[in-house]
Image: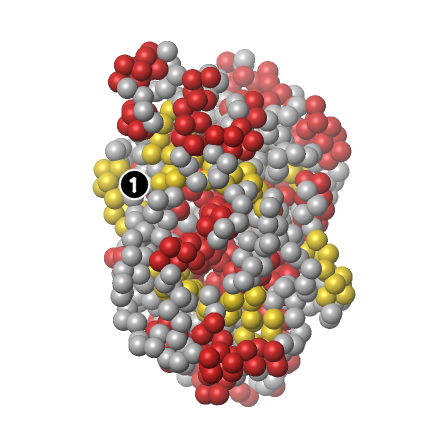
C-alpha cells in the first residue's frame, strides 16, 4: 500500500510551487486532479512539466463559467485536499475559497500559497518569484556573483521550492491532526517567509552586528577589489583545475582545511611564523597571498588527479560544477538509482529525479506519466456530478471555529544530527507542536560556533528544542538515548556513514526498544555508495546539484589559459553563488527533512507500518532545480538569465531607475496590454511593429529590453512601484538593504506578520522568523533557541534517573 493511497487532491494551481506540492502527493499514492485553464496550464510550456505532472489526472476547467466552478465544488465534496496558488481573495471571488468549500466537506484540508501572504502592504501584489526576491533584498544578496555593480538576478527558484515544502508541512500536519479530530482546516503559507527560512546564519550575524556595531561590522566574503574578508573564502573556495574545470571545495572545519592545505602542498604554512594564525589574517597582503597560493595549488592538478586525491584522503573533497541534466549523472545519484525514466506520451522517455523521499515499506510509485490536457475529462466531470447528487450542503463554518491545539501535539522527535540541513528540518516541526530532543556532544553542535559570537551560529536550528549533552561513546550514554527513543515517535539522524551503527543508534538498534519508531536518515549524499562518507557542506552540494552553474550562467571564465586574476574573479563569483548565508543548498534540504518526517508520521498514523525513510541534500536539490535538470529530447528550452544577470527576458528582469533599480514581472501575453497602458504616458509601444504580436515581442526581446531600460531610467524606483502597482502591473523597487533589515522593518516584516519576538538565554529578546504555515483551527508556536545541555537534568529526571545518579553521570563525564 502507498503512504497516501485513498486521498483525493484537487490542484487548482498553475505554478511550479503548487506542482511540487501535488507531485509529492501523487508520487505516494494520492489521486491528484489537475485543474487546468482553457488551453492548458502555463506549466506545460516548461521542459520540466513531464516531471511536475507525473501521476496526475487532467481536466480543463474555465473558472469564469459558473457551471465549471460548480464542477470544482463537486470535486471538493469528496476531496481530502484542495490546493490553490491564487492571489489572496481570488478564490473567494470565484466562490471556491475555503469558506465556500468547507461547509460542503468539513474534512477538507484547503491549502493556499501566495507571494506575500494575506496581510501587509504587498498582499495584493502578484507573487512572482522575482518580485518577492526584489522586495526582500534577495537580488542584493546575490550581487557578489555578478561582475557588475548592483543587484543580480537569481535563476534558482529559492522562494518557490521552499514554499512548496512549507505548504506540504501544512498539508501533512493538518492531515495528521485530522486523523484524531476528524476535521479539516485551511492552511496558508507564502513565498516571503519560505525564502527567509533558507538562511543559515545570516539572521543572527545581522543581529550581532546590530547589537554591537563597534565590534562587529557586516562585510561581504570578498572586498570590492577581490580581497577575501572571511576565512570562509578559503574554507569553501572554488578553483580552476589544470584541465580547465571548476571545482568547489568544502573544507568548512579546521581539520578539513588542514587536510586540504596538505593536498595543495601548503601544509608547511602552518609552521611558518609569517603565516601564523592561518587562515585568519588582519592584513590584506597575507589574505591575498594565501588565496593566490591556494588557487595555484588547485591548478597544478587535473580533475582526474584531484579525484585520486579525494580517494586517498576522505577529509579532502570537492565537486565539479554540474549543469542541468549532468546533475543526474552524479555517481551518488546513479548508485542510489535515483534518476528514473518515464515514458511520456508527448516527449517519449523522459529522464527525471526519483521520489523526494524514500520509504522502505510504502515506496513511491512512479509508473504513470504526466497527463495529456483534459485527458480525464469525462471521468472527473462524472465524479463531480455524482458527488453533487450524493451530498447536500451544510452550514457555513465560521473562521476560527472549533479551534484546536498544535497539530503535532504529542509527537516526540529524537534528533541525532548536526549543523543545518537536518537540525533545521526538525526545528520547523517544533513550530507545529512537536517535541524535539536534541542529543549534543559536550562542546555542543558545531554550528553553535560557526560565526565568531557565542551561540549565534546555532540559534535558528535550536529553536523550540530541548538539548541534552551526552557522551555517545559510552554504554551509559547510549542507554540514555535508548530510553528517549523508547518514548519517541521519530528519529532524525545525519551522522556520517557508520557512526550511528558504531554507537548502536541505527534504526535496527533503536527499533528493538521501540518497534513503532519512524526512522529518517538525512545525510548529505547517502547511506552507502561512492560519496556517502564525504563531508557534505552546502557549497559542494550546490555545485553538484547545479545551483552554482545555473546562477552564474555563461559569465564564468573557463579553459586552460585563464590567468590568475581571472581565476580570482571566478572564485569570487562562484562563492557568491554557492556560499551566501541567506540561501544555501542545506536550506532546501532542511525543509525536505520536515516534509519527509511528516510523511513518515502520517503514514504510520494512517495505520501503515513504522518504517525507515531516506532523503539527502543532493536529491533534495535535484528536485528544487528540476526546471533546469529535466530536459526532454526535442522539448521546450529551459529559461536562462542573460550574461549580465539582469533577468530572463524584457518583461521579467531588473531595470535601472534614476535612483536605484526596479524589477518588472509581466511575462505572460495577458499582461502585455496592462503594461502598455500603464507605460503609455512615457512611451507608446503600440506603434512599434516589433512588439505588435507576442511572437514579435519574443523575437525582438533584446530590443524591447532596450526600450524599457530607457523608460525606467527616467524616474525613481518608488515612483515606478507606486504607479505600476496601482495599475496591477507587478513592478517593485529592488531593495538593496539586507534581507534582515527588510524583514525587521515595521512597514514590511511586522506588517506582513512574518516575524515573532522571543527571548533567548544569550540574546534576550530578539525577532525570529514566524512559523511558515498558518492554520484556521490549529495553533502554531514560535519558541526561542536553547543552549547546549540546557535540559540535561530535567530530561534525565523525566527518564527516571534520580539526583544521585545524575550527579554521578556528570562526575564521570557521561552527561554535561
Give the image location of residue 478, x and y in percent.
46, 22
Q: Is residue 473 visible?
A: yes
Q: Residue at x 68, y 65 (%)?
A: 369
Q: Residue at x 27, y 66 (%)?
A: 401
For the N terminus, the quadrant is: bottom right
Q: Residue at x 38, y 43 (%)?
A: 411
Q: Residue at x 72, y 31 (%)?
A: 307
Relative horizontal placement of residue 714, taking residue 22 as reference (left or right)? left
Give the image location of residue 797, x and y in percent.
29, 25
Relative horizontal placement of residue 501, taking residue 513 as reference (left or right)? right
Give the image location of residue 90, x and y in percent.
40, 76
The answer to whether 132 is drawn above or below residue 76 in the figure is: above
The quadrant holding residue 484 is: top left
Relative horizontal placement of residue 709, taking residue 89 as reference (left or right)? right
The answer to whether 726 is drawn above or below residue 141 in the figure is: below
* Element type at mark 1: loop
Figure colour scheme: secondary structure
Amino acid at each position: 500500500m502507498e503512504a497516501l493511497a485513498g486521498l483525493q487532491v484537487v490542484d487548482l494551481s498553475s505554478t511550479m510551487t503548487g506542482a511540487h506540492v501535488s507531485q509529492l502527493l501523487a508520487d505516494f499514492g494520492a489521486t491528484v486532479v489537475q485543474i487546468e485553464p482553457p488551453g492548458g496550464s502555463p506549466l506545460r510550456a516548461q521542459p520540466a512539466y513531464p516531471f511536475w505532472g507525473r501521476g496526475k489526472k487532467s481536466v480543463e476547467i474555465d473558472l469564469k463559467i459558473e457551471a465549471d466552478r460548480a464542477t470544482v465544488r463537486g470535486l471538493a465534496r469528496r476531496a481530502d485536499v484542495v490546493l490553490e496558488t491564487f492571489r489572496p481573495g481570488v478564490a473567494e471571488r470565484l466562490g471556491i475559497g475555503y469558506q465556500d468549500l468547507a461547509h460542503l466537506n468539513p474534512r477538507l484540508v484547503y491549502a493556499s500559497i501566495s507571494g506575500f501572504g494575506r496581510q501587509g502592504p504587498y498582499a495584493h501584489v502578484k507573487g512572482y518569484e522575482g518580485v518577492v526576491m526584489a522586495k526582500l533584498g534577495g537580488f542584493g544578496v546575490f550581487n557578489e556573483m555578478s561582475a557588475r555593480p548592483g543587484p543580480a538576478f537569481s535563476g534558482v527558484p529559492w522562494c518557490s521550492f521552499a514554499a512548496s515544502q512549507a505548504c506540504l508541512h501544512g498539508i501533512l500536519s493538518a492531515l495528521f491532526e485530522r486523523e484524531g479530530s476528524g476535521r479539516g482546516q485551511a492552511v496558508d503559507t507564502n513565498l516571503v517567509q519560505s525564502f527567509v527560512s533558507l538562511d543559515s546564519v545570516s539572521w543572527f550575524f545581522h543581529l550581532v552586528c546590530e547589537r554591537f556595531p563597534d565590534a562587529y561590522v557586516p562585510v561581504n566574503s570578498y572586498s570590492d577589489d577581490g580581497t577575501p574578508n572571511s576565512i570562509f573564502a578559503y574554507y569553501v573556495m572554488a578553483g580552476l583545475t589544470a584541465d580547465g574545470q571548476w571545482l568547489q571545495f568544502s573544507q568548512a572545519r579546521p581539520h578539513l582545511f588542514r587536510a586540504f592545505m596538505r593536498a595543495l602542498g601548503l601544509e608547511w604554512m602552518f609552521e611558518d611564523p609569517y603565516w601564523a594564525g592561518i587562515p585568519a589574517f588582519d592584513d590584506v597582503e597575507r589574505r591575498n597571498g594565501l588565496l593566490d597560493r591556494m588557487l595555484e595549488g588547485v591548478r597544478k592538478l587535473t580533475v582526474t588527479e584531484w579525484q585520486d586525491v579525494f580517494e586517498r584522503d576522505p577529509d579532502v573533497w570537492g565537486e565539479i560544477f554540474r549543469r542541468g541534466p549532468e546533475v543526474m549523472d552524479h555517481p551518488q545519484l546513479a548508485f542510489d538509482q535515483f534518476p528514473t525514466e518515464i515514458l511520456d506520451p508527448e516527449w517519449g522517455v523522459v529522464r527525471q529525479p526519483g521520489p523526494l523521499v524514500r520509504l522502505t515499506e510504502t515506496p513511491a510509485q512512479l509508473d504513470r506519466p504526466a497527463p495529456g490536457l483534459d485527458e480525464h475529462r469525462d471521468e472527473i466531470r462524472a465524479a463531480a456530478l455524482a458527488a453533487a447528487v450524493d451530498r447536500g450542503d451544510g452550514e457555513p463554518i465560521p473562521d476560527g471555529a472549533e479551534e484546536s491545539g498544535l497539530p503535532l501535539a504529542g509527537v516526540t522527535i529524537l534528533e541525532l544530527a548536526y549543523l543545518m540541513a537536518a537540525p533545521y528540518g526538525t526545528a520547523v516541526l517544533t513550530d507545529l507542536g512537536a517535541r524535539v530532543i536534541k542529543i549534543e556532544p559536550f562542546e555542543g553542535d558545531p554550528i553553535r560556533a560557526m560565526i565568531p559570537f557565542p551561540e549565534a551560529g546555532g540559534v535558528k536550528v535550536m529553536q523550540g528544542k530541548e538539548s541534552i549533552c551526552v557522551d555517545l561513546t559510552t554504554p551509559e550514554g547510549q542507554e540514555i538515548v535508548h530510553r528517549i527513543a523508547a518514548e519517541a515517535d521519530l528519529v532524525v539522524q545525519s551522522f556520517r556513514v557508520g557512526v550511528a551503527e558504531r554507537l548502536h543508534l541505527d534504526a535496527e538498534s533503536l527499533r528493538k526498544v521501540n518497534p513503532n519508531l519512524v526512522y529518517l536518515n538525512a545525510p548529505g549524499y547517502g547511506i552507502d555508495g561512492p560519496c556517502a562518507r564525504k563531508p557534505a557542506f552546502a557549497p559542494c552540494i550546490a555545485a553538484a546539484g547545479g545551483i552554482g552553474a545555473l546562477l552564474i550562467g555563461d559569465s564564468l571564465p573557463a579553459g586552460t589559459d585563464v590567468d590568475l586574476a581571472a581565476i580570482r574573479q571566478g572564485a569570487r563569483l562562484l562563492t557568491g553563488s554557492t556560499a551566501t548565508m541567506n540561501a544555501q543548498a542545506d536550506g532546501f534540504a532542511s525543509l525536505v527533512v520536515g516534509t519527509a518526517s511528516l510523511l513518515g508520521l502520517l503514514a504510520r498514523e494512517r495505520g501503515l507500518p513504522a518504517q525507515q525513510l531516506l532523503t539527502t541534500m543532493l536529491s533534495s536539490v535535484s528536485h528544487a532545480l528540476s526546471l533546469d535538470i529535466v530536459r526532454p529530447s526535442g522539448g521546450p528550452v529551459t529559461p536562462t538569465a542573460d550574461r549580465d544577470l539582469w533577468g530572463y527576458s524584457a518583461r521579467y528582469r531588473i531595470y535601472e531607475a534614476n535612483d536605484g533599480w526596479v524589477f518588472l514581472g509581466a511575462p505572460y501575453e495577458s499582461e502585455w496590454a496592462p503594461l502598455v497602458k500603464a507605460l503609455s504616458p512615457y512611451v507608446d509601444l503600440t506603434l512599434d511593429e516589433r512588439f505588435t504580436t507576442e511572437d514579435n515581442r519574443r523575437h525582438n526581446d533584446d530590443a524591447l529590453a532596450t526600450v524599457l531600460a530607457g523608460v525606467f531610467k527616467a524616474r525613481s524606483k518608488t515612483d515606478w512601484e507606486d504607479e505600476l502597482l496601482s495599475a496591477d502591473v507587478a513592478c517593485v523597487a529592488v531593495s538593496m538593504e539586507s534581507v534582515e533589515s527588510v524583514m525587521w522593518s515595521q512597514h514590511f516584516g511586522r506588517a506582513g506578520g512574518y516575524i515573532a519576538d522571543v527571548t533567548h538565554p544569550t540574546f534576550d529578546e530578539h525577532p525570529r522568523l514566524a512559523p511558515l504555515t498558518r492554520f484556521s483551527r490549529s495553533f502554531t508556536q514560535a519558541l526561542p533557541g536553547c543552549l547546549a545541555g540546557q535540559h540535561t537534568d530535567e530530561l534525565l529526571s523525566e527518564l527516571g534517573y534520580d539526583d544521585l545518579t545524575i550527579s554521578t553521570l556528570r562526575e564521570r563525564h557521561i552527561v554535561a
